[in-house]
Amino acid sequence: MRVHSTPPRGAAPPMSCALQRRPKNRRPSRRAARRPPRRKPLRPAGPGRPTPPTPGVGTDRRTQTRLRRGQIEIDARIDLHGRTQQAARDALEAFLSGSAARGHRCVLVITGKGSTRRDNEAGFMPDRDRGVLREQVPRWLALPPLAQHVVTWQPAARQHGGAGALYVLVRRKK
């Protein structure tokens, strides 16, 4: 006669096992550890602040994918680091109109990520938590006179600056 060390299927476990509590694993799973942090959405549009355009609108899916992955050749680039908003906007207007005149298809606009604030450094603008140019350039691209030169835009791939840069598809002259 055989003696079974495990109870048959469907049978309740022995009482001593049922009352024991197993310690929970407190570490996050590997998948959760690899997930990027959730991004904070842009501030809602208010008076004098247009709604930011949605990236990728105005192109087919293949072009959007190639643009997002950085697979479209970059014809020109501009770095807006260290400029005031007005100087950056003027430079961007001149750059995009010149790029359109030269027949460029894809340009890279480097805004920089901006400085992050610590909780105790709220300053006089506590609601601003990312770079001014990084937030404003997409809005500018949706407004005249820049909108007439822009088909769409996407955040750049990591090798071209990641979140601190934008790919801009320039409208072709007819």
Image (tube, helix red, strand yellow):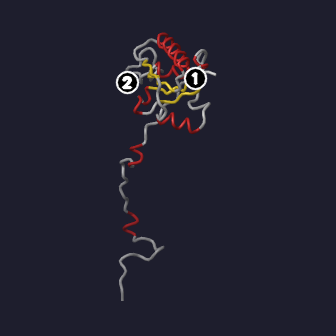
Residue 118: mark in rendering: 2
Residue at horizontal 51%, vertical 36%?
A: 66
Callout 2: SS: loop
First along the sequence among labels 2 and 1: 2
Q: Could you tell me the amino acid type at mark 2?
A: Arg
Cα–Cα span, label 2 and label 1: 35 Å
The residue indicated by pointer 1 is 150
104 above or below 2?
above
From the image, which quarter does the N terminus lie in? bottom left
Which image quarter: residue 14?
bottom left
**Circle 2: is it few (<14), some (14-19), or many (20+) Cα within 10 Å?**
few
Image spot of residue 2 (x, y percent): 36, 86
Q: Could you tell me the amino acid type at mark 1?
A: Val
Residue at horizontal 46%, vertical 75%?
A: 9
97 above or below 8?
above
Pick out the residue farthest to the right.
174
